[in-house]
Amino acid sequence: MGETAPPQSRVCGLRPFPSGMDHRESIHPLSATNRPSMKLAPVFQNHAVLQRDLPLPVWGRAEAGGRVTVRLADHEAVTTANEDGHWLLRLPPLPAGGPHELVAESASGRVQLDDVLIGDVWLCSGQSNMAWALERLGRKCWDEVETLPQVRLLTVNNPARLGKSTAVGGQWNPCTPESLAAFSAVGGYFGRALHHALGVPVGLICNAWGGSRIQAWISRETLLQDPVGHDEVRYYESHVWQPDDTPQIKSIDDWVRANAPQDPGNLGLERGWASPDFDDVSWPLMSLPCHWNKRGHPYNGIFWFRRTETVPESWLGQDIVLSLGAVDKFDDTWVNGEHVGGMGNEILNAWCQPRIYTIPARLIGPDRRVTIAVRAISHVRDAGLTGPAEIMRLYPISDTEKTIPLHGDWRYAVELNWGMVEPPTQFVWGAGNHNSPHILFDNRVAPLIPYGLRGVIWYQGETNANANEASLYRRLLPMMIRDWRRAWGQGDFPFLQVQLANYKEPTQIPKRSGWAELREAQLEALKEPATGIAVAIDIGDADDIHPPNKRDVGLRLARWALAEMEGCGGVPSGPLFSGMKIDAGGRVRCSFRHIGTGLVARDGALRHFALAGRDRVFKWADASIDGTTVVVSSNEVPEPMAVRYAWADNPDTCNLYNKEGLPASPFRSDSWPE
């Protein structure tokens, strides 16, 4: 059987956004003119959840100057549309319950929504670790997945474009195993825990964008009030919106097209590497999933991976599903020489999307052999077949319980070595680029305002955890919290965040850390009212910026919400540093909040404490628990002035917990410049 070429070649540059296109009319029907019929804002749909115990904002469009009436659960509110036909009203607060009908009508028409619940609505926002879907956990998550009729899910899918959006893209769905699998894993675990604990409907809105900076999530008006933000916005508006005014490359798309390697053509296909008859016995083995740049191949390029399996006789005569997991960045995949699928730059965040392809029954012969060949392309940063392992499998379309695992050894060959390609550390912006200042606020946040919320959970910061921006984050995060609360106008709703997990090479000596600085900035944000934090310093992965343990992250967020916001009691988190004293003899005594029923060292003596004296040179120190405090000392630092704990990108052996099993946050007592 001869191998077939993919339907189109993969281009390593990002697809440019057509210049001059105005997106607002095409995806935001509420912004269109000459549409007098009654319309609700698109966020109001069948199966929606509305926030309990608050005046309920409802808005939409009708005929200009028309009288609008909205009814919900025996309550009614009336308003008049303005001269443009826009209207907004507030229904009186309602208790948890439903399902209800929501009816909006005017002289121009009537709209009815069914199966509307009243409960708690949480906005789940941030970057890729929040967007990371439950299905990426594979089969091990399915035992925990439930059909929860009173939990509803909405994933916002608005693109990032110039101008401010007025409508939300995405659909409310009841929580089923299928809808939850495609939803944020952190959000799903969080919402399920709240629903079980409180017994009220829960609405979860996932509004996250992989690789996004916090500056993209803050409004233009607020950024202009900050000196650095002001300069970014002015530069963006004076140059990026008018790129002909400057010779510099202004968008990341341009940078990729100008600098990233381009696919010269499918050399591997020409060599027969997709054919089932090709002899790959001389190819070395690589255990998948992994990033190849962290397995002895520190470069970008094009790799081929091959593996042959024999399927059971009972699988013959039916289509078979090939689940490869994610491929960082693009792929084309063949089975028995025929191209069965591929994903490239036409898919948003293709690098983290699971590949699921159908193998037609006709491709499997009497020998029952399935030869899989994957051409994986990475033109920038990380690279590989990244799984997770649990979803790398073959299974018959008629019975998803039967499975042949595909994680483990694959044969591989290098088609092209491009060297390691790193974008500039200074972010560049442009139309459609998600890192442009205020662009995600304009396109992802603004369309939701003033939809009633119980609160926000936030998992972001990885993109800002660099030497240039980590210290700036201590201003930006509180700024964003205040910005969103001011925009919603419903007071200080809870804002809970995930502290960055451990990542990168473990630290052998105390040294500067951008990730530690950013974690400290996240702690500083707890000075804002009604804020909380889920410490994740013990569940990261040195080789993966997307640690798969999303369950504990979601449950730790829920724990804080239940303890601090819902009055359910209990300790909300692990120990948080509250101060230090220097005892006689040069011992430093550290105090903590949230020690619960006591402090504990896991797996031996306490580790990852360091002391420094006047020279500001930190040395590893001995530490032990003394009642509700930790005592730290070092013979190398007889006159200590500062203490640090787990101050590293990846303090993988840090082990201070409370007896409730929650880890202590990294901290430092000093404020010395890094």
Image (spheres, grey):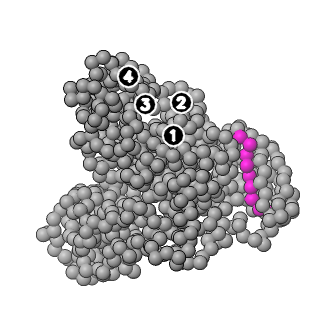
Measured Cα–Cα span from mark 3 to mark 2 = 16 Å
Q: CA distance from mark 1 to mark 2?
A: 19 Å
Which of labels 3 and 4 is toward the front?
Answer: 4
Q: Is residue 658 visible?
A: yes
Quadrant assignment, res 236: bottom right
Q: Are the residues at dot 3 and dot 4 in contact (C-beta closer than 8 Å)?
A: no
Q: Position of residue 571 (x, y in %)?
A: 48, 27
| Amino acid type, callout 3 | Leu
Inspect the image, locate mark 1, and give the three-letter code of the amino acid beneath it.
Ala
- Please name the residue that numbered disc 2 is placed on: 563
Mark 2 secondary-structure assignment? helix
Q: Which residue is mark 4?
A: 581
In this picture, residue 279 sits left or right of residue 646: left
Q: Earlier in the sequence, mark 3 or mark 4?
A: 3
Residue 435 lies in the magenta-colored region: no
CB contact under 8 Å: marks 2 and 4: no
Cα–Cα gap, marks 2 and 4: 29 Å
Front-lying residue, 95 or 178? 95
- Please tell me in which quadrant of the rendered image residue 599 appears: top left
Task: State which mark lies toward you, 4 or 1.
Answer: 4
Closest to the observer, 352 or 135 = 352
